[in-house]
Every structure is written in structure tokens, then in C-alpha cells.
Amino acid sequence: MMYLSHISAYLFWRSFDGASFRVEPLSIVNGNPENRKRQRDRIVSFAQANGFVDVRGKAHITASNGVAAARSSAIATHKIENDVAASCLLIDGEIAVSSPELTFVQMSSLLESTQLIALGNELCSRYVISQDQISQRKTITSSAKLGKFLEMNSNLRSCTKAKAACGFIVDGARSPMEWKCFMLLTLSHVKGGAKLPAPKLNSRIDLKTPIQAIDQWGYPRIINSFECDLVWEEKRLVVVEYQGKEWHSDESALLRDAVKNNRLVGQNITLFELTKDIVYDEVAFSEFCETLAKALNHRNRIRAASAYEKSRILRRAIMPTNWFEQAISKSHQARKR
């Protein structure tokens, strides 16, 4: 059996919008030796045509036990001893690919801990980026599904590392900055985070006093709740809303956010607005975290040595738009040494 795996599988799931490709359970595995080369060539062509290749232009393919490894400048071949056919899916009825859960485990052998957490957050997100535009999709996996898969397949290589990362993954991010802010706020000081309690992501808040508004067609409507980016359910609700232009399609979206935030303040909710400038400024972000911690009645008694440097390293690892490509390039250079 051969299937798209590791980096190639992740790039597929990262761009999967639920419409471009049809994905279904793998029911039949063709192990006929005379078909292996044809099967391999078809997988490579598919990966190359859709950009599911690594920084060297190689498609990553896993060959199950007993299948000869391919020798080609266009292929990075992996071999696995375990039978994982049940953990693979079919793309458009012909190309096998690692499931999101299996892909997460496979990538744990290639990435550092923080990078693996970031990758898990993207797998568990509700967005897809295409041509620098963001759109929403149905979730393809969750932290609970990842955890269940790891428990059932504890004999897989790098499973221990994957389990450790799984505990820091958040479900349902609607944009990259949501999970990036979550990581910066909640990871331990050793990992470069602020070590604050974990909030709920995109949680719906019921308004004590419903408000009347006008919809996009000019008709009046009643708003009974808002969905907020980061929510801590303390004695008084604490909310952090990320304000950024990079994932808003137009000015009207920014206006809607501003109106929402003004309404939240009037509902006896402690509201903080977080911007890209604050996130990138180490001093400003540290001050933001201290103020937020006070609102949460949370005290961080112990700070890791060189906390600013660790925070800087975390930002460099996850903040760039092409963070994954940088991580893979760094991993490749390390293996060459």
C-alpha cells in the first residue's frame, strides 16, 4: 500500500475546503506489485500538480511493510511497520492520503514541540487560506479526535511527542491569529508563552439585554448573542477580541467588529482589544498580559529565565504567514547536518 503522507498530506489538509476534492474512507487496498509503479506515479503527479510537495519539490509517500521503497528525485519515501489502512482516506476515489490524525503523528517526527502544536491548531481550525484570502470550512478533526487516535495507536513512532503537544491544541480557530494569540497567551514561560488560563475560543456570549440592529439588507433585527474570539468565564466575563485587517475582506467587517465591541462594553463585560502591533511588540504584549492577568485574578509567580528571549523565539516560530514552510526548511537543514 502507498499513500500521500507527512508534509504532502499536511499540505493537502491545510488547503482542504471540503469542495475541491472528494474524500471518502479507504475500503480497498490494491497490493498488486505490478500496479505499484503506476500507483506511485499517480500519487506523485497529483502532489506536484497541486503543490503538495516539500521545499525540495519532493512528494512524501509512505510505503507499508513489504512494499519496495521508491528511488526518485521527486519522492521522499517513508516506511511504516504498522497496518494503518484504516487511518487513510481516498481523494477523488483513487489517491490514498493519511487521515488528519495520522498526519499529525507523522509530522511529530519532523517538527519541534512548539511547531507541532501550531500544526495541530491548523488541523483543528475552521478556516482555509487560498490566494491570501481566508474562508470558513467544516472542521476536519479536533483535539479530542487526535487524543483518541493517539491512545488507540500508542505504538506508532513519535506518539509520545504527539501526545505531549496535543494537550496545548485549541479547536475551532476561524483565522490564524486566533490560535497564535491562544498559544502566546497560554503556553508556559519555558515555551515562550504568558502562562495564562486557557480561554474558550469563539465562544458565544448571551447578552443580558438584547440589542436592536439593522441587517445588511436594511431590515431591523434583534441580536441576543455575540461570538467572541477569546472568552474567560470569570465572575465577570473577560473577553479578548483580536482587531486585525489582514483577514477582513472589507471595511464593513471592521465596522461590525467595532460595533460589536462597543455593545459588549455596555453588557458589563471586561473587554480587551488585541492588535497586531501589540502582539509583535514584546514590551507592549507583556504589559497587555499583565493587565489581562489582573482581570482574571491570576498570578504568575514563577518566570522562566530569559523569558523575553523565549517569547521572541516563539513569535519567530509561529507568527510569520509562512511559518510552516520555515519550520520544514529548518528541519531539513538540521537533518542535513
Image (spheres, rainbow, N blue to C red):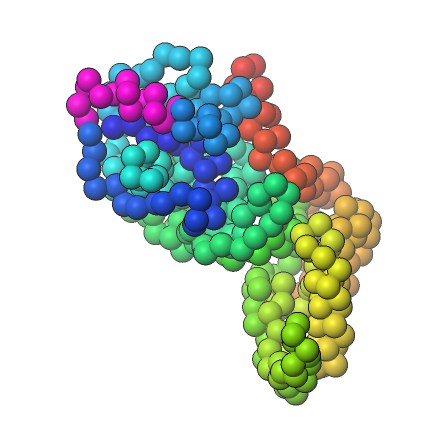
| Rendered position, 310 above or below 183 | above
Q: Is residue 43 magenta?
A: yes
Figure quadrant of residue 314: top right
- Asked if residue 151 is positioned above or below residue 328 in the image, the reply reads below
Q: Is residue 238 magenta?
A: no
Residue 80, position as x, y percentages in the image: 30, 27
Q: Is residue 233 visible?
A: no
Q: Position of residue 107 (x, y in %)?
A: 45, 34
Residue 190: where, in percent of width, then height? 63, 43
| Dominant secondary-structure state across the stretch colored magenta | helix
Q: Image quadrant of residue 332?
A: top right
Tell me the residue at 64%/58% (across/down). 196
Instruction: Read off the magenta span.
Output: 31-44
Residue drawn 82% across and 52% down? 284
Q: Residue at x 56, y 52 (%)?
A: 135
Residue 70, by quadrant, is top left
Q: Residue 321 at x, y = what percent? A: 65, 40
Horizontally, is 206 left or right of 153 in the view? right
